[in-house]
Image (cartoon, rainbow, N blue to C red):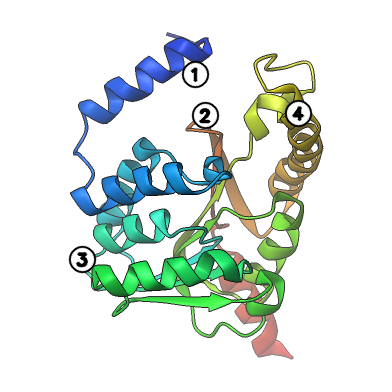
Amino acid sequence: MLGSVLPFSPDLADRVSEYCEKHSEELPESLDKHWEWTVRTWMDAEMMSSKLQGQWMIWMSQWMAPKRVLEVGTFTGFSALAWYEGTRATNAEIITLDVRGEVLNFTRKMFKELGVDDRIRVIEGPAASMLEHVEGQFDLIFLDADKHNYQLYMNRILERRLLSPHGVVLVDNVFARGLTMGNEFNPYIEKIRRPFWEANGETLRKLNKSFLDDPRIDTLILPLFDGVTQIKWRAGYLERQEAGAAKQ
């Protein structure tokens, strides 16, 4: 196959996703139950990652073996639980940022009940401000929050060097349900939600170009879920910056 993406209809995409879930390492029972609870409880549950994406997060973090994880966008904590599960071997510290106090009250309580608050720290407040105060570097950073601020968040991360020299940033939803490629794409979006995703599509279109043009980083966009961008420091960039600073 020369192409990279199969042309799935929504029905077929759901069937393929279900097949992948069943033929991959299954989610721990606690994550599965939490995912189902979120769907039943929260009207905006579509903000949460899919079960398959949770399985991917666990696999990725097991493979990367990060010692510190930073997450921008907590919601009810499903993704933080996935990072926790995937970093049992490294006992990684996980810091997750979100501004929605009414959701975080439930999330903190759930983390405590599951006994994962030993390694997951929830910081409440606007992410742009919180990123100015977070200390140290992170081997894995996950952006899954308000799309119109992705550029601001990424600039904070790079300017403050929150990403470790060999770390990776994962940016979620860079396809905006397909509308990043153009508003004529994806006729299946609900009419009431279309303006929201069209606005995000325009924002993310500019963002993806900005990432590609940024001399500090190397970028790879993959057709996973709703589009995932992988970002790392460009080879030699940090060394050149340090050499330049030493000459001053």
Of circles 1 and 4, which is in front?
4
For residue 221, side relative to residue 63 (left or right): right
Q: Earlier in the sequence, mark 3 or mark 4?
A: 3
Q: Quick check: 14 above or below 41?
A: above
Q: Which mark is residue 4?
A: 1
Q: Residue at x 71, y 71 (%)?
A: 128
Q: Earlier in the sequence, mark 1 or mark 4?
A: 1
For residue 127, side relative to residue 202 (left or right): left
Q: Residue at x 77, y 37 (%)?
A: 196
Q: How many marks?
A: 4
The residue tagged 4 is 192
For the question of whether residue 159 can be seen, the reply is yes
The answer to the question of whether label 3 and label 2 lie on touching residues, with beta carbons closer than 8 A, is no
Q: Secondary structure at mark 2?
A: loop
Of circles 1 and 3, which is in front?
3
Amino acid type of the residue that numbered disc 4 sits on in the rendered structure: Ile
The answer to the question of whether label 1 and label 2 lie on touching residues, with beta carbons closer than 8 A, is yes
Q: Earlier in the sequence, mark 1 or mark 2?
A: 1
Q: Position of residue 165 (x, y in %)?
A: 48, 69
Observer-nearest residue: 130 or 60? Answer: 130
Q: Marks 1/2: CA distance?
A: 8 Å
Of circles 3 and 4, which is in front?
4
Amino acid type of the residue that numbered disc 2 sits on in the rendered structure: Pro
Q: Secondary structure at mark 4?
A: helix
Q: Position of residue 52 (x, y in %)?
A: 35, 36
Q: Marks 4/2: CA distance?
A: 25 Å
Q: Marks 1/4: CA distance?
A: 31 Å
The residue tagged 3 is 88
Q: Secondary structure at mark 3?
A: loop
